[in-house]
Image (cartoon, rainbow, N blue to C red):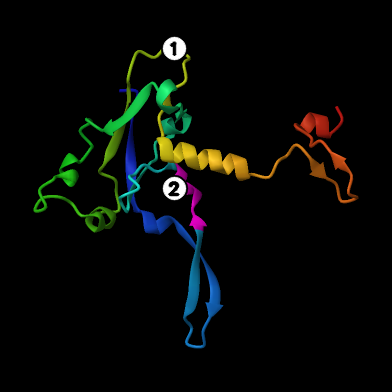
Amino acid sequence: RITATPVITLERAEIRLWEKHESFEDGSARMELVGHQLLGNYCYGSVDSSLLFFPYSPTVNFINHGGKQKSNAEVRWSTVSHHKSEWLSEDEMTRTTLQEMKDKLKTGLMFDIVAKRDIRRGEEVLLDYGEDWEGAWNQHVEEWPSMLNVREDDGELRQPYLNITERLGR
């Protein structure tokens, strides 16, 4: 095990962002879904599930996407004693519901980040975030406004400053 991390259990609907588009006299409003909180980028879950898991140990902040080819670690349910594996029971009589997990106001579920092979000292730990994440990232990069050509207020086209030292002229 590289690290263990507790996870917060969320419902996908909890990270949706809504915008009011029309207000009515009775105080109600017509809302429109405009996106999702950035927090969703750091959650694990299946696209077929309303359930998301947010790992919140500081150690996971240093693990990045390596894709299928470069990943050297994977996520598994934890084997540490603090992990409440009974919450995930396949038996409906003993399984903890999502609402029961949320009502506990504490974590019980944990992930282990486990090496898939020997990792050298100084080597970056990389996970495969999956094809859906990679596709969404590539789309985001394509749609992001280019910083290569920035137009000044006077209409002059110039290259942007790439660092503060250059901007200050030092």
Residue located beneath label 2 in the image: 40
The residue sitting at 47% across, 36% down in the picture is 134
Q: Is residue 154 above or below residue 58?
A: below
Vertical comparison of 111 with 68: above or below: below
Q: Quadrant of the C terminus?
A: top right
Residue carrying label 1: 121
Q: Position of residue 97 (x, y in %)?
A: 20, 55
- Crowdedness near tag 1: few (<14), some (14–19) or many (≥20) residues, C-alpha within 10 Å: few
**9 sits left or right of 133 in the view:** left
In the depicted structure, whether residue 71 falls above or below residue 35: above
Q: Nearer the viewer, residue 59 or 127?
A: 127
The answer to whether residue 161 is left or right of residue 34 is: right
Instruction: Tell me which numbered mark, 1 or 2, is placed earlier along the sequence.
Output: 2
Kind of residue at badge 2: Gly
Look at the image and tell me in which quarter the N terminus lies. Answer: top left
Q: Is residue 2 magenta?
A: no
Quadrant assignment, res 156: top right
Query: Residue 116 in the image: x percent, y percent?
Result: 32, 20
Q: Amino acid at mark 1?
A: Arg
Q: Quadrant of residue 15?
A: bottom left
Query: How busy is the neighbourhood of tag 2: few (under 14 within 10 Å), some, or many (20 plus)?
Result: some
Closer to the camera in the image, 57 or 99 = 99
Residue at 61%, 41% (x, y): give it. 142
Residue 161: image quadrant is top right
Query: What residue span does the magenta drawing correspond to?
Result: 35-41
Separation of marks 1 and 2 at Cα, in angstroms: 31 Å
Secondary element at image label 1: loop
Q: Position of residue 74 (x, y in %)?
A: 34, 27
Residue 41: image x %, image y %?
46, 44
Name the mark on residue 30: none
Label 2 element class:
helix
Q: Nearer the viewer, residue 106 or 1?
A: 1
